[in-house]
Image: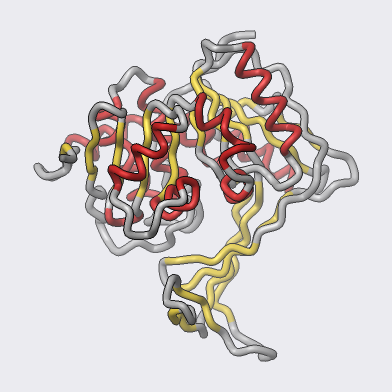
Amino acid sequence: MKQLDFVAIGDIVTDAFIRLKEAEVQPSIDHTKQELCMEFAAKIPYESVTIIPAVGNSANAAIAAARLGLSSALVANQGDDTYAKENLVVLKNEHVLRDFIKNHPGANSNYHYVLWYGAERTILVKHENYSYHLPDIGSPKWLYLTSLGANTLTFHLEIEEYLKKHPEVKLAFQPGTFQIAAGIEKMRYFYSRAEVLVMNVEEAEKVTGLPGDAKIRELTTALHKLGSKIILITDGPKGAYLSTGRNAWFMPAYPDPKPPYERTGAGDAFASTFVSALALGKTPEEALRWAPINSMSVVQHVGAREGLLSLSVLKKYLQKAPPDYEPTPLG
């Protein structure tokens, strides 16, 4: 088998974006988050529905890598329904290798409902139960592990054994909801093995147990103690932080050409572009300049895939970046 540059592991889904017309955003009772509010037991009009197949953290990452010129593949499980067929067509058109995707006869494919209000979204998720097994993926340069369903602990052990047998494979770990909720002990190997660990500020606080007002340096120090070499913490439109253990930087967001249209997939675009840049031989600082550009582009479109850029277009954005679009060392 020819060596691949980038293999993503995770669940593939179809997203149905329901654009709401009548809703409100209000603070929760404890004021720790915002809540989407609609009238209960009522008929609520919506504006439109946009259905986007072949998404999810891992599919988004595999497609981002392919568009940036890497040989890319996806390890995923799905049913044998219409949605599964649509997923495969999209991946073929995106030049993502589909040999490692398992279709399960009689099963449903993952289908999520996205309540889209303003530029933000609330996603109703359901991970179907499949029998997960790691196919023979050879020895790719990078393995990108991300969101999987709650019934995958055994599968994680299988991935762990693979990585132990292939120390030459670099691991990028972008933990999903289940992987974070499972706790450090059950996921300790992946934190310790990660060449790159990517999460947002809130996820970093959950993993480390540090309070909401913890400083970035505290978060990255705690995450490095788990063994991860490069820590990437995103903070939405505020920017992102990178730590190599010895050095750390803040990176501002790339200026939006117009207000964001819909934010799904911005984090996936950031994380996968950063890792793709490393796979293309860039330094962490250089990769940090690439990542926000794909995020900026993605939020100008509906869904996580349409705005992902080719390498040539991304480089054009780099060339016309403003002077202050540079990593700033953290003290």
Q: Residue at x 84, y 38 (%)?
A: 104
Residue positioned most to the right: 106
Q: Position of residue 92 (x, y in %)?
A: 62, 32
Q: Which residue is nearer to you in this view: 162 or 58?
A: 162
Q: Residue at x 44, y 44 (%)?
A: 199
Q: Which residue is nearer to you in this view: 237 or 183?
A: 183
Residue 311 seen in the figure: yes
Q: Residue at x 43, y 58 (%)?
A: 263
Residue 267 seen in the figure: no
**Left or right of residue 197, residue 292 in this image:** left
Q: Position of residue 48 (x, y in %)?
A: 56, 72
**Left or right of residue 19, residue 132 in this image:** right
For the N terminus, the image quarter is top right
**Looking at the picture, does residue 105 appear above or below residue 193?**
below
Q: Residue at x 62, y 61 (%)?
A: 16
**Left or right of residue 238, residue 303 in this image:** right
Specify the quadrant of the image occupied by residue 308.
Answer: top left
Q: Which residue is nearer to you in this view: 73 or 274?
A: 274
Q: Which residue is nearer to you in this view: 167 or 256?
A: 167
**Looking at the picture, does residue 281 appear above or below residue 322?**
above
Q: Position of residue 236 (x, y in %)?
A: 35, 55
Q: Position of residue 89 (x, y in %)?
A: 66, 38
